[in-house]
Image (tube, rainbow, N blue to C red):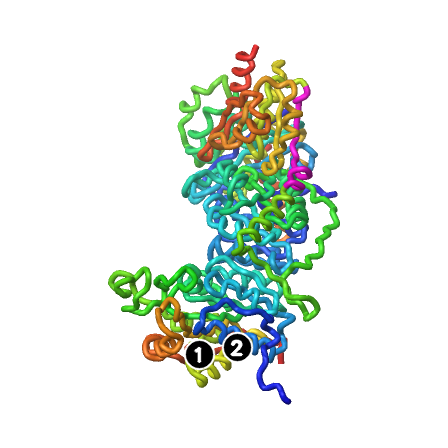
């Protein structure tokens, strides 16, 4: 299979088309714009729909409509735009519709900045919208993984009839790496619930998130949470390196994990027993996998491009068994390998 | 081996393109690479730059903060990055645009190797207007052969055929000529 | 014995939740009749708003989607673009379409989105209990304009058909009322045209129907009908504001 050199954003767009995404609706925002630009150029040629919406709100609702009519649909944005989409995401979740939402993160809050950041972890994993619901959140750390997770995201969305987010960032979106597109036969499941016209052959389908009777609403949410239990069982994914004997486990996702990995390598060369745990899914958080990675650990260091949004998830996953320290840069700053190495060395001195 | 490179200059000088040439070359050599551009408003009329990492190992941070090789095509780029170049690193400056006097560079003597080449002027003189970036790349190929994970002139020549679209085929030969000019300095 | 009156097939056999004297029932029926007449029920997707007609998904017999408040035109766009052969209509109230959803309706119109919009204007928010709408008439008393709408404070009502008639993507913008048999006949014709336009791919069509809200206006049904005639029609004149072919479809004869 041929290797090609692609930007993360463009690779994601190409992967989406190959994964059977038929409709893309978006609105320009840095640093995700290459996704829109790539799809604008290629979607129609390949029988799909690209439409620039009048707002993020309209874009996510167009996704709702397309998903409701039974096709694979996607939208992409960055922090400020994702906030605007939150209304639609909640309705999509409440209507049990599958779709893929991409957040190429930049610094926040407010207009923030446009440089890479991971400051939307809480938004993605806790509450992208009102009501009791969750999204599966994939966190790629390379351009290749961005591609692989895009395929996965569409499959997961269809399988569980829920919104799935790919949480990228400005660094992963803008960088180029050599990649290979997998030769996967895309299988899109039947969607008998879709609103595409009943052809007078079945009762009318209704796609709706309104339940005025408390019992009905409670039941519908309970039913959804039963699916989340399967999601929590089957979807968690993570990569562990050097964790078998690690006394210090560095926990990092996405772009920050690349830097953390270099720092772990450097520290290993100096004889420090340190490993890296990299969650690939942020919801569901890989609870069992981190427990396994931390068997010999005395301490965990979370390295993030924010103010420590993942720290609580690590503590909860480990039942507060281990101290969890944090090192991060934010605002568009990216931690350097040197900075992370210094943190690891200082912890190593302290736990001796 | 990990080689970290920053290529920086005014938007339009082709610094992102130079980086892409290296990135494609690395891919052709099956070397791990990453290419990361600066982006945002600073690109408009200001200084654009890209980070390129070449390595036998998987690449961690694609953002270069301490380069082994710096290509600086204007004074702001020199000012921004020259102090961060690693001990023993090499700096290639387009001296027809970046016009700091020779004594500015004296303080770096013995720490880093500095090559001041009037690349844009040479490009003009050789009928290769606008290809100062590739002339500097040619010079890098010559001076840094031990740092480029096996990337040489032939790899770059082949990379040009991948990057330059068939519609602009004539540019392939021009770029090759610019590499040769750079190597000949 | 011959059948002289029956429920349209495009309406489900259920009782509706609308208040006595509310004209949603008439408007639902007209839409359903048009769906029956054109034989499109099996191919139609309706988009409900947020507001009194939120539960129209239980009343229309075609596939139905319930949209977030104001976003029905965006949802309709998604459905129509994903499946251009379906017939897509939105059914929206004045708060939904002309306040929170102004952006979506204007841009769906500007794109010449090949959909049909039924816009029910009764100058008040019904479901939330009678607050000022974007179409509340100056002087009109509502829960949030207890001293009457004062344009100096609350601004002026939005005249949607007039506004959209200036938009290039609009094929039909027509205002009708359902206060009399004659007006109902006119309204039915307009709705038929709005669907025909879509079937023939002529562009975006909107029919604004002046409607009542006896409950929140504090009137009897007949007083409410009288208000449509004496207060609403003078402020929102009936008529065709735009009738044009936006898209010439080469594929349909």
Q: Which of C33 and B159 is in front in this view?
A: C33
The residue sitting at the bottom extreme is C1
The answer to whether residue A17 is above or below residue B38 is below
Is residue A45 in view? Answer: no
Furthest-top residue in this view: A352
Nearest the viewer among A103 and C158 is C158
Tell me what residue is drawn at x 53 percent, y 79 percent. C192
Q: Which residue is drawn at 66% across and 22% down?
A: A242
- Which residue does the image show at 59% across and 25% down from the upper left? A262
Q: Residue C15 is drawn in which quadrant?
A: bottom right
Reply yes or no: does residue C231 show up in magenta: no
Q: Chain for mark 1?
A: C
**Location of residue C84 (image quadrant):** bottom right
In reply to whether residue A232 is colored magenta, the answer given is yes
Which residue, given by chain and number where applicable, does mark 2 sit on?
C30
Q: Which residue carries the number 1 mark?
A: C178
Q: In which quadrant will I find the N terminus of chain B? A: top right
Dot placed on the residue nearer the N-terminal end, 2 or 1:
2
Task: Please provide percent x and percent y for residue A174.
Answer: 55, 41
Residue C213: percent from left, percent from top = 40, 70
Who is closer to the viewer here, B58 or C209? Answer: C209
Q: Mark 2 lies on which chain?
A: C
The span shown in magenta is A229-244
Labels 2 & 1 near each other (Cβ < 8 A) = yes
Where A6 sits versus A288, above or below? Answer: below
Where's the C terminus of chain B, which quadrant?
top right
Observer able to see residue A6: yes
| Residue at disc 2, secondary structure | helix
Quadrant in the rendering for residue C8: bottom right
Placement of A261 over or under A179, stated as above or below = above
Tell me the element at label 1.
loop
Q: Where does the image place residue C140, in percent across and percent down from the top left?
A: 30, 68
């Amino acid at each position: 299979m041929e290797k090609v050199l692609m930007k993360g954003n463009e690779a994601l767009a190409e992967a989406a088309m190959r994964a059977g995404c038929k409709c893309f609706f978006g609105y320009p925002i840095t640093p995700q714009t290459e996704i829109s630009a790539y799809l604008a150029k290629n979607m129609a040629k390949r029988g799909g729909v690209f439409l620039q919406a009048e707002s993020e709100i309209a874009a996510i609702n167009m996704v709702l409509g397309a998903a409701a009519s039974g096709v694979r649909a996607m939208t992409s944005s960055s922090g400020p735009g994702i906030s605007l989409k939150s209304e639609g995401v909640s309705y999509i979740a409440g209507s049990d519709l599958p779709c893929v939402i991409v957040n190429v993160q930049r610094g926040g809050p407010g207009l923030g900045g446009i440089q890479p950041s991971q400051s939307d972890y809480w938004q993605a994993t806790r509450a992208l919208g009102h009501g009791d619901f969750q999204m599966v959140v994939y966190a790629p750390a390379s351009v290749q993984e961005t591609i692989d997770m895009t395929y996965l995201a569409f499959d997961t969305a269809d399988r569980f009839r829920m919104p799935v987010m790919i949480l990228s960032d400005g660094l992963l979106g803008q960088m180029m790496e050599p990649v290979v597109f997998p030769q996967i036969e895309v299988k899109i499941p039947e969607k008998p619930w879709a609103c595409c016209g009943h052809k007078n052959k079945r009762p009318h389908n209704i796609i709706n998130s309104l339940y005025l009777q408390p019992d009905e609403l409670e039941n519908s949410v309970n039913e959804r949470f039963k699916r989340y239990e399967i999601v929590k069982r089957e979807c968690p994914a993570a990569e562990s390196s050097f964790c078998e004997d690690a006394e210090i486990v560095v926990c990092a996702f996405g772009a920050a994990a690349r830097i953390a990995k270099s720092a772990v390598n450097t520290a290993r060369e100096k004889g420090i027993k340190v490993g890296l745990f990299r969650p690939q899914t942020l919801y569901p958080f890989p609870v069992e996998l981190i427990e396994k990675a931390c068997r010999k650990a005395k301490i965990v260091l979370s390295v993030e491009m924010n103010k420590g949004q993942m720290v609580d998830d690590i503590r909860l996953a480990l039942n507060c068994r281990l101290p969890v320290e944090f090192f991060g840069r934010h605002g568009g700053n990216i931690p350097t390998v040197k900075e992370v190495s210094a943190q690891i060395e200082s912890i190593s001195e302290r736990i001796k | 081996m990990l080689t970290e490179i920053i290529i920086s200059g005014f938007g339009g000088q082709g610094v992102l393109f130079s980086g892409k040439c290296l990135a494609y070359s690395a891919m052709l050599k099956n070397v791990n690479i990453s290419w990361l551009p600066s982006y945002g408003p600073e690109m408009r009329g200001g200084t654009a730059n890209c980070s390129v990492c070449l390595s036998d190992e998987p690449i961690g941070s694609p953002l270069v903060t301490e380069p082994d090789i710096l290509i600086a095509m204007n004074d702001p780029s020199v000012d921004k990055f020259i102090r961060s170049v690693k001990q023993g690193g090499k700096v290639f400056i387009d001296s027809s645009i970046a016009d700091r006097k020779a004594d500015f560079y004296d303080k770096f003597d013995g720490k880093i190797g500095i090559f001041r080449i009037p690349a844009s002027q040479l490009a003009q003189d050789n009928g290769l207007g606008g290809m100062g970036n590739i002339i500097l790349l040619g010079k890098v190929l010559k001076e840094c052969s031990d740092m480029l994970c096996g990337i040489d002139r032939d790899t770059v020549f082949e990379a040009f055929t991948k990057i330059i679209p068939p519609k602009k085929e004539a540019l392939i030969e021009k770029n090759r000529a610019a590499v040769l000019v750079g190597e000949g300095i | 014995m011959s059948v002289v009156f029956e429920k349209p097939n495009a309406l489900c056999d259920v009782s509706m939740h609308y208040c006595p004297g509310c004209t949603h029932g008439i408007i639902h029926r007209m839409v359903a009749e048009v769906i029956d007449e054109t034989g499109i029920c099996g191919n139609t997707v309706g988009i409900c708003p947020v507001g009194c007609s939120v539960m129209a998904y239980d009343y229309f017999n075609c596939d139905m989607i319930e949209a977030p408040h104001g976003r029905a035109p965006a949802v309709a766009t998604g459905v129509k673009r994903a499946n251009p052969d379906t017939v897509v209509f939105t059914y929206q109230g004045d708060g939904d379409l002309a306040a929170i959803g102004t952006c979506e309706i204007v841009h769906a119109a500007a794109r010449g989105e090949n959909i049909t919009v039924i816009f029910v204007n009764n100058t008040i928010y019904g479901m939330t209990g009678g607050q000022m709408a974007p179409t509340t008439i100056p002087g009109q008393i509502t829960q949030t304009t207890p001293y009457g709408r004062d344009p100096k404070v609350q601004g002026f009502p939005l005249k949607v058909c007039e506004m959209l008639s200036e938009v290039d993507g609009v094929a039909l913008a027509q205002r009708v009322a359902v206060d009399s048999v004659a007006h109902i006949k006119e309204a039915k014709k307009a709705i038929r045209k709005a669907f025909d336009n879509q079937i023939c791919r002529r562009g975006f069509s909107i029919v604004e129907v002046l409607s009542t809200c006896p409950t929140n206006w504090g009137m009897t049904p007949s007083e409410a009908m009288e208000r449509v005639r004496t207060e609403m029609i003078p402020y929102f004149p009936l008529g065709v504001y735009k009738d044009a072919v936006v898209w010439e479809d080469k594929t349909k004869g």
